């Protein structure tokens, strides 16, 4: 069932720090992609025990990142993402907040590229139509800061109607898809000569390719340098 859009602006510097943990990030991503799930259902996907998932979900709940959803069978109550999207602080924030956001971003980037590599490795398991529709592209652009901001907003507006948690009319054949957009003004580095690099990765997250219970994500339990978005 579609939810009303409810984006949360994260202003508490403790929130990125709490989320900058590979298992917690995997749990939140899974709930945002697939909707309400119990700790036991999450455990099948992220490669952790149900009790470990339950503990980390409670930690996420402390920072209002997840919340309990209604149970459909009066058994274990599932968890769901508390917001349909998160916005993190900008450059005006203090050093502590920027460090926490940078740590979370690094971990988020690790997960984005892990998903892309996993899809590329297993794309032969997907139907031909999905392989044809998936994309991995990059473009070297020359833009002003104003133009880059406008392009970012235009791409966001194109993508937003398809957000899984808020889309009301997905066709029966619709599946979860991961789209990652990176727009980096690499021209800030003198050697790179004033270009803005735009990368768009769209990889299938279902169809027995990714995030299925048989995929044990043990790596989610290993120490990883922080990450954010």
Image (cartoon, rainbow, N blue to C red):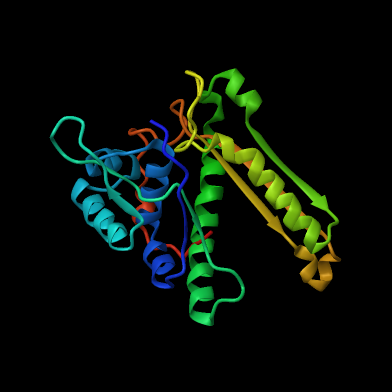
Q: Position of residue 3 (x, y in %)?
A: 41, 38
Quarter of the image with the N terminus is top left
Residue at point 52%, 47% (across, down): 114
The residue most toward the bottom is 95
The residue most toward the front is 4
Q: Position of residue 198 (x, y in %)?
A: 73, 51
Tell whether 23 sits left or right of 142: left
Residue at point 13%, 34% (across, down): 74
Q: Quadrant of residue 189?
A: bottom right
Residue at point 21%, 31% (across, down): 72
Q: How many discs mark residues in the rendered view?
A: 0
Tell whether 57 sits left or right of 101: left
> Which of 85 and 209 lies nearest the eye of the viewer?
85
Where 159 sits versus 171, above or below?
A: below
Q: Position of residue 21 (x, y in %)?
A: 38, 61
Q: Quadrant of residue 79?
A: top left
Where 58 sits versus 192, above or below?
A: above
The residue most toward the left is 74
> Which of 54 and 160 lies nearest the eye of the viewer?
160
Q: Position of residue 200 (x, y in %)?
A: 67, 44
């Amino acid at each position: 069932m579609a939810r009303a859009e409810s984006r949360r602006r994260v202003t508490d510097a403790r929130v990125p720090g709490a989320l900058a943990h590979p298992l917690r990030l995997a749990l939140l991503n899974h709930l945002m992609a697939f909707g309400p799930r119990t700790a036991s259902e999450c455990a099948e996907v992220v490669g952790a025990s149900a009790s470990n998932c339950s503990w980390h979900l409670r930690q996420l709940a402390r920072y209002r990142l997840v919340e309990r959803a209604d149970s459909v069978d009066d058994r274990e109550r599932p968890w769901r993402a508390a917001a349909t999207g998160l916005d993190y602080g900008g450059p005006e924030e203090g050093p502590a907040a920027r460090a926490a956001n940078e740590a979370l971003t690094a971990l988020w980037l690790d997960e984005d590229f892990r998903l892309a590599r996993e899809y590329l490795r297993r794309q032969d398991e997907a139907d031909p139509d999905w392989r044809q529709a998936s994309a991995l592209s990059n473009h070297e652009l020359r833009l002003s800061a104003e133009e880059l901001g406008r392009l970012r907003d235009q791409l966001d507006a194109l993508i937003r109607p398809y957000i899984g948690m808020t889309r009301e009319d997905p066709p029966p054949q619709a599946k979860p898809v991961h789209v990652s957009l990176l727009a980096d003004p690499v021209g800030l580095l003198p050697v790179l000569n004033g270009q803005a690099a735009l990368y768009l990765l769209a990889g299938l997250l279902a169809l027995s390719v990714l995030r299925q219970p048989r995929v044990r994500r043990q790596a989610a339990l290993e120490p990883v340098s922080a990450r954010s978005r």
